[in-house]
Image: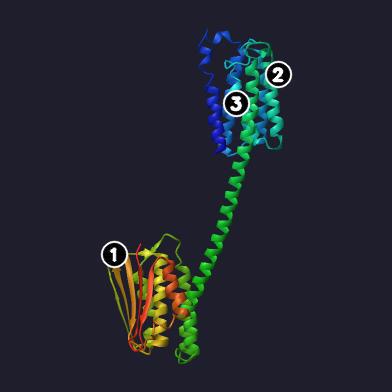
């Protein structure tokens, strides 16, 4: 931003004089070095800021060259004017010299003060013959203007760079915090997934509820390993979509509830669109946990899982059992329900609630809309 502002400033400063040669006698009234110096200085400024814009910085070498060239044309060109015009606006060097001091004050580093003093001193030396003419006050006022603009630019540039540095540091800290949050979220997701799948399988085996013999245990473990491998291979990047109907159907088909319960009834709306992969993963995991809880606590032989279209382009997943239930008004959700149903669904911008009463079963309802 600063470099582009300086480029526009320098361009305007050169344009201020472009009409002068075509008045009061035309270009012929100026010494050749006046016009030649103008062309050289203008072309150098074009090269200077073209390189600076491409590199997004002004190197010390370019600033030094800018100052050296300004010193040369401040003396040579100013001495080429008649004394009465040396410090007047007809001398094209005045605006660009001001631009050079501003640039040096911002990008001159520890040499900014000597650079500004050198340029202003060269201007005074070049326009010194005007001291005894009617333009003597302009010699002083232009010198003060160059120094004043350089001082203001130096302070402003320092403040802008400090603000930009602070913004960069804040952005870096935010990125670090975001990375930590994403890693923590990923760990939470992995823990939740393990709780809903592998740990449930191991707990069932340990309690004797699953696997009546060694061969059966091996089969269950092999199936679980394949399921985990499929989960890893099917991981999708952000922005992709997945079939929620297929994901729910596969999960229910492979769930231990198919063996532990007499019947798992499913009804999935065929009109359901593909949803963001993260939404499909969360809803499938939450439904799995709801079935886990039915197997472990409901004392029933039947469960029902439905997925219905929720306009516009959303979904409502419901898991129902007619088991023993519990008092939802006084009993807070357990670890599994809280960490694997309520929190994940809220995390994707959806809503979930668990309604139950003693002897009346349990309803788990989850909704999401884009």
For label 3, count other residues whose C-alpha is less than 10 Å away and answer few (under 14), some (14-19) or many (20+). Answer: some
Q: Position of residue 148 (x, y in %)?
A: 63, 29
SS at mark 1 in the image: loop
Please name the residue that numbered disc 2 is placed on: 125
Q: Is residue 22 above or below residue 237?
A: above
Please name the residue that numbered disc 1 is placed on: 311
SS at mark 2 in the image: helix
Answer with the quarter of the image where residue 254 lies. bottom left
Residue closer to the observer: 40 or 123: 123
214 sits to left or right of 131? left
The answer, for residue 227, to whether it is visible in the render is no
Reading the chain from its start, which is encountered first: label 2 or label 1?
2
277 sits to left or right of 118? left
The answer, for residue 340, to whether it is visible in the render is yes
Q: Nearer the viewer, mark 1 or mark 3?
A: 1
Reading the chain from its start, which is encountered first: label 1 or label 3?
3
For label 1, count other residues whose C-alpha is less than 10 Å away and answer few (under 14), some (14-19) or many (20+). Answer: few
Q: Nearer the viewer, mark 2 or mark 1?
A: 2
**Cα–Cα gap, marks 2 and 1:** 80 Å
**Cα–Cα gap, marks 1 and 3:** 64 Å
Please name the residue that numbered disc 3 is placed on: 44
In the rendered view of the protein, which quadrant contains the C terminus? bottom left
Q: Do residues under tags 1 and 3 come within 8 Å of each other at their CB atoms?
A: no
Q: Position of residue 137 (x, y in %)?
A: 64, 17
State the mark number for residue 152.
Answer: none
Residue at horizontal 35 percent and vertical 85 percent from the top:
357
């Amino acid at each position: 931003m600063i470099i582009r502002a300086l480029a526009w400033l320098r361009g305007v400063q050169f344009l201020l004089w472009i009409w002068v040669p075509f008045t009061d006698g035309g270009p012929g009234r100026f010494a050749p070095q006046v016009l030649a110096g103008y062309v050289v200085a203008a072309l150098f400024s074009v090269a200077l800021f073209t390189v600076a814009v491409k590199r997004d910085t002004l190197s010390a070498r370019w600033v030094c060259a800018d100052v050296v060239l300004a010193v040369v044309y401040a003396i040579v060109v100013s001495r080429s004017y008649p004394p009465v015009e040396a410090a007047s606006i007809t001398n094209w060097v005045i605006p660009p010299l001001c631009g050079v001091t501003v640039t040096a004050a911002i990008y001159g580093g520890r040499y900014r003060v000597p650079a500004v003093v050198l340029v202003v001193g060269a201007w005074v030396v070049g326009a010194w013959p005007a001291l005894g003419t009617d333009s003597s006050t302009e010699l002083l006022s232009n010198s003060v203007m160059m120094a004043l603009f350089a001082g203001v630019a130096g302070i402003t540039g320092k403040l802008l760079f400090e603000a930009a540095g602070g913004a960069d540091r804040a952005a870096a800290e935010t990125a670090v915090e975001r990375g930590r949050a994403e890693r923590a979220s990923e760990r939470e997701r992995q823990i939740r997934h393990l709780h809903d799948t592998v740990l449930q399988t191991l707990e069932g085996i340990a309690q004797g509820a699953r696997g009546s013999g060694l061969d059966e245990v091996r089969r269950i473990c092999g199936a679980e390993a394949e399921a985990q491998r499929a989960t890893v291979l099917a991981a999708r990047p952000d922005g992709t979509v997945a079939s929620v109907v297929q994901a729910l159907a596969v999960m229910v088909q492979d769930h231990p509830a198919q063996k532990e319960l007499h019947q798992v009834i499913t009804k999935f709306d065929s009109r359901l669109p593909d949803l963001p992969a993260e939404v499909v993963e969360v809803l499938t995991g939450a439904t799995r946990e709801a079935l886990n809880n039915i197997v472990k606590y409901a004392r029933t032989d039947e469960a029902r899982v439905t997925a219905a279209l929720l306009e516009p382009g959303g979904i409502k997943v419901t898991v129902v059992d007619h088991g023993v239930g519990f008092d939802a008004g006084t009993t807070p959700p357990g670890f599994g329900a809280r960490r694997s149903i309520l929190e994940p669904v809220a995390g994707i911008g959806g809503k979930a609630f668990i309604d139950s009463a003693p002897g009346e079963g349990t309803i788990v309802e989850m909704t999401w809309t884009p």
